[in-house]
Image (spheres, grey):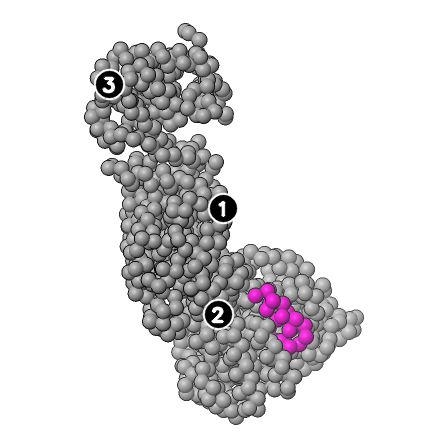
């Protein structure tokens, strides 16, 4: 298995690879729109869209999704999650949505995100793009585009670190879960 | 019978020393110095380490019978009083029917004597049905056994009726006990009016609701030349009016309750209806004034205003629940508490529940002299204990003092030489 | 951060930080009401019982919409509070409702203190929708939200609350809340409608409306009830309107940018005229809109952030 990218140069390489894959498989760019799941997915979605706009010369719509209210574990946690806004500046109806998240693990976040999107309208298709797939699914959900399949012990978490302007990805952090 | 080895505290005879008491035919036969020869063959009650007190007189209580037996009846009330060391209960007229005629008076007296525990002395209504309009049959009630008249629970609103009532009661030498409250001012109030009532969103009863009436009644008493007793005063202002009246030689006496001497409005903060009473618990400044009023002999008596209400009634909202708390079994413990916390002579506090009410009501009792009625309370100042609902002998358990820890407890209560209560 | 409260009984119980948390989150909840599908599944399977023992349409509707937009099941029960003076007590009714296992009870009640008692005795969340003249915390929160939405900040805001301060739970909750978030409050009323001890509230007190108008950023008018005339708090509606009503003349005296609020329902022609209620300074309908968002936040915090068992 390849090395997990850690710094911004390695991350950029992975993003470029994902952009290539998207350009190969998606032909009709007029209907494509990106939605990132707050906060890691949002960062990736906006970074990818910058690359794709450079490459295609077209405006690619991008929005951000806060899935807190769609989670199924709200009453299981002591700390209440902060609710931030969802901000989708386009109509999702008929669009080919690229749903973007940083890490695919149990699949529950993706389930919540899909529920959220369909509450906003009726998209044509929804594709899933993730940077890391660490396995351990609890729902039958698979990514259409995957940056890298990785294997991590349960007690480890993997997170993207934004740069100071919170516009692009500065690196990847792997840390212990606080118990 | 001989009560041996106790410390005799008797404000009426200025006595506070160790002595033995012999009792015969319901009266005190002799009071003997320690070591004196005692008659043989008598039952001996060992009061070593205990205080031997004149039986307490509670000049303001509600026994609820007839009419409200679900709250309390004369039997349960008598049991509770006996357990509290109270040998004489003066019960108010707001029963159903109201004690405004000799038939009700006789009923209460017969019932109490058939129970045979404490002495129950009824108060007759000032006006028929406590309505403040027509005078009740005070003379006939006096013959039947009332010891005073009062419309307690309600004020006599009309000054003209009040004047006539004082004059007419005095015709029969009946003391008049006044509940002073201007109902237009107290209106929908349920607690002391002030910053706290505003914060809690509860309607307030201003101090002046009481004070304007105290003021009026003192003036009417002066004009009529008739003594009045103002019951359950609760404010510094009332006390000041009474102080002024006494200084002018107006014959006015007053009492307050144990709860107004130990609690303040601050307790209402949790909306617990066991802190809802009328007059309401007042400010700390008022409480302090009342305590000092006792110390300076301005407050003549302490009376429980024992007011049983069923649990269902007290479970209502603070705005809706009835006013009042029970008090028989906490009277002496609270006097002890006041004695300890405010450094007031115990015998001075004791005078407020023995000698003074006896004098105001013209009763034979409240003293431990040779030939006095053998109404005796034996109190053990030693033990500390905590009040629980199971200990309460009243039918109703509406006490704010549940869970309080007290010093000293009643070990035996005797009425005319008969033991009516012994602690386990 | 943990949300430490099972219940929302009184603004007096909330810290400044907690109030700001509620206001911040409400913006996110407000967005939901702007969608085509105005519903999120957050509280799916939760039951919210609305117990209203006092006439109210808007507060009940607001709570009901808030709960439904979070996918909670709601059921409403209205009755007259006076039915508890005899027979069944309110506590009987409350324990009966509790036996049906609701997750939250929203209660409006004509007497002070009940929500506090329910919060103490029942395991479910209690949200006070107004108890007697005690508190109406959700109204104060939506008022503060509306002010902050309009002015961007609450710090240093000059707020005049005008009318029956003595009998108003809205005034109490707003005074406590606005003081915590750093606004400056003046209460305006004839002396007969000022509560005892108002000097201890730490607010400015005025009996003269006109000078206060010229200083205020927010003028919050309170409903005044006819009942107060019977209680001799003021002689009649005409005189009240003259001295304490918000009319065209007074609207014209307001500072530039100042706004008019009213918790509703309005007594048009008494404390407020058409010019004031419906003019461009009025943010009364914003208050109504924001009420749903703020109540969604409170339901979310009370029901979501609070259950034990990780």
Tell me the CA gap for discs 1 and 2. 32 Å
- Alpha-carbon neighbours of circle 2 within 10 Å: few (<14), some, or many (≥20)? many
Q: Which chain's residue wears label 1?
A: C
Residue C120 drawn at (x, y percent): 45, 50
Marks 1 and 2 close (CB-CB < 8 Å)? no
Decide if residue B373 is on the left or right side of residue B139: right
Q: Which chain's residue wears label 2?
A: B
What label sits on residue B205 in the rendered view?
Answer: 2
Decide if residue A124 is on the left or right side of residue B412: left
Name the quarter where the C terminus of chain C is drawn: top left
Depicted C228 relative to depicted C35: above or below: below
Q: Quadrant of residue B370?
A: bottom right
Find numbered disc 3 in the image and state the secondary structure of the residue it sits on: helix
- Could you confirm whether marks 3 and 1 are on the same chain? no
Decide if residue C186 is on the left or right side of residue B335: left
Observer able to see residue B363:
no
Magenta-colored span:
B283-302
Which residue in the rendered view is the most extreme toward the bottom?
B171
Tell me the CA gap for discs 2 and 3. 77 Å
Residue at image x 50%, y 71%? Answer: B206
- Alpha-carbon neighbours of circle 1 within 10 Å: few (<14), some, or many (≥20)? few
Reading the image, the residue beneath label 1 is C15
């Amino acid at each position: 298995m390849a090395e997990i990218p850690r710094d911004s140069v390695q991350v950029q390489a992975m993003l470029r690879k994902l952009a290539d894959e998207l350009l190969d498989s998606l032909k009709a760019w007029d209907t494509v729109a990106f939605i990132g799941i707050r906060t890691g997915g949002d960062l990736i979605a906006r970074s990818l869209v910058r690359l794709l706009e450079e490459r295609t010369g077209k405006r690619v719509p991008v929005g951000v999704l806060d899935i807190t209210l769609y989670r199924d574990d709200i009453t299981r946690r002591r700390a209440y999650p902060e609710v931030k806004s969802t901000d989708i500046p386009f109509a999702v109806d008929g669009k080919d949505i690229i749903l973007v998240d940083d890490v695919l693990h149990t699949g529950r976040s993706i389930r919540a995100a899909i529920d959220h999107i369909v509450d906003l309208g009726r998209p044509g298709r929804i594709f899933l793009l993730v940077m890391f797939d660490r396995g351990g699914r609890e729902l039958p959900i698979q990514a259409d585009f995957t940056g890298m399949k990785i294997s991590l012990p349960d007690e480890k978490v993997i997170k993207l670190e934004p740069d100071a302007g919170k516009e692009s990805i500065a690196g990847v952090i792997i840390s212990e879960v606080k118990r | 019978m001989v009560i041996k080895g106790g410390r005799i505290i008797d404000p009426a005879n200025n006595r506070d020393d160790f002595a033995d008491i012999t009792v015969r035919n319901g009266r005190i036969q002799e009071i003997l110095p320690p070591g004196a020869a005692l008659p043989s063959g008598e039952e001996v009650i060992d009061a070593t380490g205990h205080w031997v007190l004149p039986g307490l007189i509670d000049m303001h209580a509600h026994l609820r019978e007839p009419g409200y037996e679900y709250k309390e009846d004369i039997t349960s009330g008598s049991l509770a009083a006996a357990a509290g060391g109270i040998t004489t209960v003066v019960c108010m007229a707001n029963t159903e029917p109201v004690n405004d005629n000799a038939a009700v008076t006789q009923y209460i007296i017969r019932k109490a004597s058939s129970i045979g525990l404490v002495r129950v002395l009824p108060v007759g209504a000032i006006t028929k049905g406590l309505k403040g309009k027509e005078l009740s049959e005070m003379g006939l009630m006096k013959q039947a056994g009332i010891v005073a008249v009062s419309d307690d629970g309600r004020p006599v609103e009309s000054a003209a009726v009040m004047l006539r009532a004082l004059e007419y009661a005095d015709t029969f030498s009946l003391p008049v006990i006044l509940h002073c409250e201007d109902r237009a001012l107290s209106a929908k109030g349920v607690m002391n009016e002030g910053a706290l009532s505003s914060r809690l969103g509860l309607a307030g009863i201003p101090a002046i609701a009481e004070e304007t009436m105290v003021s009026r009644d003192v003036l009417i008493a002066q004009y009529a030349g008739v003594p009045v007793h103002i019951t359950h005063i609760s404010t510094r202002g009332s006390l000041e009016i009474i102080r002024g009246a006494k200084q002018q030689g107006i014959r006015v006496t007053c009492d307050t309750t144990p709860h107004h001497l130990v609690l303040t409005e601050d307790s209402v903060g949790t909306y617990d209806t066991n802190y809802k009473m009328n007059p309401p618990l007042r400010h700390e400044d008022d409480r302090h004034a009342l305590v000092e009023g006792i110390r300076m002999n301005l407050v003549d008596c302490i009376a429980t205003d024992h007011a049983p209400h069923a649990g269902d009634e007290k479970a209502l909202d603070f705005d809706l629940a009835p006013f009042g708390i029970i008090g028989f079994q906490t009277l002496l413990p609270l006097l002890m508490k006041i004695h300890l916390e405010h450094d007031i002579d115990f015998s001075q506090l004791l005078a407020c529940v023995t000698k003074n009410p006896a004098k105001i009501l013209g009763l034979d009792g409240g003293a431990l002299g040779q030939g006095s009625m053998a109404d005796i309370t034996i109190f053990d100042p030693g033990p500390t204990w905590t009040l629980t609902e199971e200990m309460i002998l009243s039918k109703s358990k509406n006490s704010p003092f549940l869970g309080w820890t007290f010093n000293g407890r009643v070990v035996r209560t005797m009425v005319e030489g008969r033991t009516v209560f012994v602690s386990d | 951060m943990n949300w430490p409260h099972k219940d929302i009984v009184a603004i007096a119980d909330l810290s400044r930080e907690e109030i700001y948390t509620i206001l911040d989150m409400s913006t996110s909840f407000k967005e939901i009401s702007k969608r085509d599908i105005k519903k999120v599944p957050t509280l799916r399977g939760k039951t919210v019982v609305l117990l209203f023992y006092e006439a109210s349409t808007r507060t009940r509707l607001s709570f009901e919409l808030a709960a439904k937009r979070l996918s909670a099941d709601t059921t409403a029960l209205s009755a007259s509070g006076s039915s508890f003076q005899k027979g069944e007590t309110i506590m009987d009714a409350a324990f009966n409702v509790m036996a049906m296992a609701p997750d939250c009870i929203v209660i409006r009640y004509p007497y002070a203190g009940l929500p506090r008692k329910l919060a103490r005795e029942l395991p479910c969340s209690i949200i006070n929708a107004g108890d007697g003249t005690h508190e109406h915390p959700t109204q104060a929160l939506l008022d503060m939200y509306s002010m902050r939405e309009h002015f961007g900040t609450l710090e240093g805001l000059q707020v005049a609350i005008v009318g029956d301060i003595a009998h108003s739970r809205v005034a109490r909750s707003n005074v406590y809340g606005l003081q915590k978030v750093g606004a400056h409050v003046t209460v305006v009323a004839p002396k007969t409608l000022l509560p005892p001890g108002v000097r201890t509230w730490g607010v400015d007190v005025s009996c003269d409306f006109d000078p206060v108008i010229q200083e205020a950023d927010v003028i919050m008018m309170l409903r005044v009830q006819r009942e107060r005339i019977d209680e001799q708090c003021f002689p009649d509606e005409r005189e009240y309107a003259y001295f304490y009503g918000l009319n065209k003349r007074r609207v014209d005296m307001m500072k530039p940018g100042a706004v008019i609020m009213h918790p509703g329902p309005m007594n048009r022609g008494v404390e407020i005229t058409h010019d004031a209620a419906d003019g461009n300074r009025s943010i009364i309908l914003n208050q109504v809109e924001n009420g749903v968002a703020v109540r969604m936040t409170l339901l979310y915090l009370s029901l979501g952030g609070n259950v034990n068992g990780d």
